[in-house]
Each structure stands twice: as C-alpha cells, then as structure tokens.
Image (spheres, grey):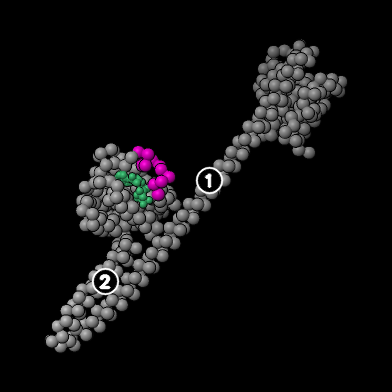
Amino acid sequence: MEANASQASVLVVDDDPKSLQALKELLRGLAPSIVLANSGEAALRCVLKQDFAVILMDVRMPGADGFATARLIREHPRSHYTPIIFVTGADEDLRSMFRGYEAGAVDYILKPVVPEILKSKISVFIDLYYKNEVLTREIAERKRAEEDLKASQENLRALAARLQSVREEEWKRISREIHDELGQALTGLKMDLTWVAHRLLPKQKALAQRTRSMFSLIDDTVQSVREIATRLRPEVLDELGLAAAIGWQARDFQMRTGIRCKVSLPADPPPLDQERSTAAFRVFQELLTNVARHANATRVDVMMQADADRLMLVVEDNGKGIAEEEAVFSPKSMGLLGMRERMLPFGGNIEIRGRPGKGTRVTVSVPVGLK
Ligand SMILES: Nc1ncnc2c1ncn2[C@@H]1O[C@H](COP(=O)(O)OP(=O)(O)OP(=O)(O)O)[C@@H](O)[C@H]1O
Ligand SMILES: [Mg+2]
C-alpha cells in the first residue's frame, strides 16, 4: 500500500532480529511509521513500495551487504535521494567508510549505538522530509496555477484573434455591399436624372438648376460611399498587398492631416498571407491615428523592410515623444494593447520608444510565416 504522503516512515535494515527490535524500540515515538527489513533484498522491496524519510542500514549483512544494498537503492528514481545512515561496528576499517560514501551515504553511526545521537540524527531527517513535502506540494500548486493562467491567457488570445478575424470579414462584406449596391443605385439614379435633364425645355430654368444640384449631390454621395467602403476595408490591401496599402494609407494620412509622411518600401516586398497583412495594416493605421491625435508632430517616417523570415515596419514621428510608462504597458492604453494582441497570433512584436521632445519610434516585426 502507498504510504500516507504526510507520514514520515523510517526503514531499519539489519540481519539480526534482536538489533532490529532494539532499534525499533529506540525510534518509537520519533516517526509515525517504522518498517523493518532483515536483509538487503527485503529492504529493496520496501523502497519500491513506499517513500522513506531516512533508511538506517546495517553494513554487515549476509547476501547483499549494506553498501551493495545502498547502491541498488540509489539506482531507483523513487529512492534515489532517500538519505541512508549506515550503522557500522567501530572496527570497520577506513576503506569501507569510503565505499560507503561512494554509494551515496549521508551519514554513519558507530556501534554500539548511542541512543541520543541516533535519535537526534533521525529526527533531523524526519524534519527535512516534512519540509520537503511542504515544498513539493507548494511547487506543484504553483505550477498548476501557472498552467491554468497560461491556458486561460491562450484561450483569451484565441478568442481575441477569432473576434478580430470575424470583424474583418464583416467589414469586408459590408464594404463590398456598400460599394456595389449603393454604387449601382447611385449610378442608376444619375442615368435617370440625365434622361430627365435631356427632356427639359429651355424655358424650364428652375428645374435645370435643380437637376444640376442633384447631379453634384449624387457625385458627392458616390465619393462618400467610396470613402466609407475604403475606410472599412481598403481594396488596395486585398488587390495589391500590404506595401501598396501602406503607401496609399500614408498619402491619405498626409492629405488629411497635413503631417508630412515619407514612406520607404522594399523593392520586392515578401508575399504575406491575408491575416498577417491585415494585422500589420491595422496596426499601421492605429499608429498613424496616434500620431495625429497625440504626437503633435510635423513629419512621420515610415520604413518597411523584409528579409527571408521577418517583415519590419518602423513608424517614427518627430513629435513630443510617448511617455515611458505608456510605451511599456498601461492597462488604459487600449490602442497599444490591441496592436500587441494583433501581433500575438503570429509571434510578432511591437517595440515602442519615446524620446521626450524628439519623437516616438515604433518598430513592428512580423514573421512572414512562409515555409
Ligand atoms: N506617437 C505618439 N506620440 C506621443 N504619445 C503617444 C503616441 N502614441 C501614443 N501616445 C500616448 O500613448 C497613449 C496610449 O495610446 P493608445 O493608442 O493605447 O490609446 P489612445 O490613442 O489614447 O486611445 P485609443 O484606445 O482610442 O487608441 C496615448 O493616450 C498617448 O498619450
Ligand atoms: Mg490610439
């Protein structure tokens, strides 16, 4: 039967039944359980079945002697670290002492045994055994807690990634529908209006004036529809890829904000899958939004670089410089947190450095993920 994990047991090994009984008497009250073995072989069977706080081992025994038994005990993972105290006659020579240490002995006791010495040695090991138990339990609990935490973080991350991709798909669909259906309806409206305009008599000046303003309203609406659709999902990203989309977004940013945006793109950008391109592009948009909202900058330099396995995107502004505590991690910085989460599923990362009064530099790095 498996020994109770919280009860320390002592194994006493001696071929002489009288010594065994005497030692048992001596140790009574020290350990909750004392197991007796009258040979090396019997001792081995015991250590295979249960753990011991310490083994008290007679050196001279017929068959496997104490040293040989100790060596075999050390060979089993379960008893590899179990402390062994050899009990040896005062006439044992020094050579056999060395043999004992080779076998991994931890202590000796000379015969005749002095009860106080034996008891104090045994109680030290029992104490150690209990402390070790507590430590082992604490380590196991901590490990389990760490694993739980890791698993729940991974679940959250997977959920975030899934939500992100569902949202992107949805935006793409809405963007197409707005573009195609509203676009077609507006084109139809314009054709009908042209038909009406052609049938107006020269004297119907007020109506002609009204149709002209309707034409211009339709044109403005067509333009807005295009802009809304593009904002939801830029076609250029799907059709021409990340580098082209970044170039386009930078020009649009410069036009809208007046902040000069210089872009340097690789001549031959690596092909990226859609998830990675989308994630990098959304991070880039968020970075530009932050520059416009917080940096007070007059220029932004964007550099995209790629090698065989990584794509790097550096966005550097010449504004006030992000404060260190915000750059490192702030639970309030949802934008930055979102960017980091965007990169996590691909093993990408984002490094942010602010220099007060000089600007902010953000480096985004994404593994291209192609085999
Ligand atoms: N380029 C920048 N220059 C200076 N400060 C910046 C820059 N980018 C971010 N910050 C600072 O870091 C903070 C966190 O940015 P983050 O994008 O996480 O949040 P936010 O832009 O304030 O809100 P949102 O959640 O809408 O993005 C900002 O509030 C701002 O103070
Ligand atoms: Mg932001």
Question: Can you see residue 267?
Answer: no
N-terminal-most mark, 2 or 1: 1
Any atom of ligand 1 within 8 Å of the CB at mark 1? no
Q: Is residue 273 magenta?
A: no
Residue drawn at 40 percent across, 49 percent down: 334
In the image: residue 99, left or right of residue 330: right
Q: Which residue does the numbered mark 1 point to in the structure image?
A: 150
Say whether marks 2 and 1 touch (CB < 8 Å): no
Residue drawn at 25 percent across, 44 percent down: 319
Label of residue 186 in the image: none
Magenta span of residues: 324-334
- Which image quarter is the C terminus in? bottom left
**Residue 73, picture quadrant:** top right
Label of residue 222 in the image: 2
Mark 1 is on which residue type?
Lys
Q: Residues under labels 2 and 1: Cα distance?
A: 49 Å
